[in-house]
Structures are given as structure tokens and as C-alpha cells.
Image: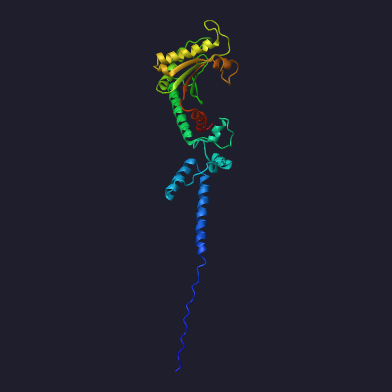
Amino acid sequence: MAARRRRKHVEEEEHGNHERWMVSYSDMLTVMMGLFIVLYAMGQVDMQKFQALRASLAASFGHQAVLTGSDGVLTSSQNVAQDEKQTTTPSQAFDPVTANVGLGVAAGTQPSVDAGVLSAARQEATRLEGVQQQIQQQLDAAGLGSAVQMRITDRGLVIGLVADDVFFAPASAQLTATALRVLDAIAPAITALPDEISVEGHANVLPVSGRYPTNWELSADRATQVLRHFVETNGLPANRVDAVGFGDARPVADATGDQALTMNRRVDVVVLSAASDQVRALVPGIVGTDQGK
């Protein structure tokens, strides 16, 4: 019997998986797509949303350095700044680029406003607007709503006592009966404030005669009479107020002719903001933006 030849068992060689690289490649594409989505999203939102995103990613990755680096990547692009100005209405946000124009910074350049300074400027603008509204309500209630002209500047709230001969007669520092009513309406609001008050007297260019040698003395006396009424009658603390006379050296810029003679015969009551110079410089721009100017 012939020996049965054993059939030699040959194991088949395993085929290597040469397509594993596709898995890693797909993962890499997914990560890159996520990165570009994040970058695109950051280019469309404000800094508050970016800070929230960064904090969220840092918490997820357990690392505080996520998305840190130069601010220029997000803020220096003029295209991004232009998109933000086109998509943000004045009532939604204050544009530091617009405000910087008034500070001597060219439009379209990178704003250098610190977030903390901007937040403080918003708060100060809101506070001064609240004081202005309170004074206006008191004047309206007394039927004197148009007797003063108020504006918010980088100094604070300026309350201009200007209205023909309502406050002062020519070459006189004596307060009229209407002027006393106006001061009594203004006093409660400014007395309750912690701010310093500057009472600033002005005169027009007409030469004076009688008791005043020059317009310097006349303007200073006008300011002093207003100060005395606030302190002696309305209880404004004397250590928070001062009076100064400017003569005819600081006329109202947009007044001419007879109008200038009338408008420059005035006293400005200025609520001096105690905020820093950086904060106060931004306040007029914020007020103008909020009012849609």
C-alpha cells in the first residue's frame, strides 16, 4: 500500500490593512475643519463672545492657554472692523474705532481701548445721562424745560444757563426771579452727587461800566452769585463747589452777532466727572452713539 503522501498545510499569509492611514487622514481633516469654523466664528463676534469661547475651550481641554496670543490676529484686520461696523447698530454696541476719531485717531486703525476702560466709560456715560434726565424732569415740572442747555463732554455734564435775559441783565450779576427758580430745580440733583461742581461765569464782548472795571470781574461775580445761592439756599456743600470767571475769553463757538451777545452772557454749572482721563475721553462718543448721532 503506497504511503499516503501528506498534503503539506500552507497557511495563507494575512493581508496587511493598508487603508489605516485613511482613518488618521479623516481625523485630521475633521480637526482642521473644526479649526477653520472656530476661526470664522471668532471673526464674526465681539470680544465678549470670544472670551466666552476661549474659556469654554480651556475648560474642555484642561489648559488655560487655549486661544491665547496676539490680539492682532482678531482685531487688526480692517476688513473685520468694517464688518463689525456694518453689522452692529448704535443701540447694540459702542464702536471704539468711531470714538477714537474724536480723540485724534484715524478711522479704520486698530483701536487701543482696554475692555475695562470701555466698560467704565459706559457706566460713567449712563450715570451722567441719568443726572441729565433727572434735571430735565425737574425743569419740565417747573415749566422751565427750555431754560437751560445741557450737554455731556469729556469734563462731565455741562448745564448752561443761557436764555436771553432770563438769568442776567446786561452788565449785571443779579439773578432774576426766573434764574432763582431754575437754580432751585437744578439743585436737588447736583447736591445729591459726590462730584465736584464748577460754576463758570462768562460775559460778552461789550465793554462794561459802573461797578465792574472789566468783563473779568463781571463774569466772576455772576459765577459767585450762582454759587452762593446753591450753598446758602439749596445746601450744596461748600467744599464741593468753586466759582471762576472767564470774562469774554471763551465765547460760544457757533454764536454770531446779536445771538453771540445774548448766549455769551451766561453761567455754566459743570458736574465734573471724577473718572480717569482715559474713561472721560470716551464718554462723549458713547453718549453720541447711544443717541444715534
Q: Position of residue 278 (x, y in %)?
A: 50, 30
The vertical placement of 180 against 118, above or below, is above
Name the residue nearer the viewer: 235 or 17.
17
Q: Position of residue 122 (x, y in %)?
A: 47, 32
Identity of the residue drawn at 54% across and 32% down:
99
Identity of the residue drawn at 57% across and 42% down:
77
Looking at the image, residue 57 sits to the left or right of residue 265; the answer is left
The answer to which image quadrant residue 227 occupies is: top left
Q: Residue furthest right?
A: 257
* Figure disc tally: 0
Identity of the residue drawn at 52% across and 62% down:
22
Q: How is the image coloured?
A: rainbow
Q: Residue furthest front?
A: 3
Q: Is residue 214 visible?
A: yes
Q: Quadrant of the C terminus?
A: top right
Q: Is residue 182 visible?
A: no
Looking at the image, residue 252 sits to the left or right of residue 136; the answer is right
Name the residue nearer the viewer: 34 or 128.
34
Q: Position of residue 153 (x, y in %)?
A: 51, 25
Q: Quadrant of the N terminus?
A: bottom left
Q: Position of residue 23 (x, y in %)?
A: 50, 62
Q: Residue furthest top?
A: 210
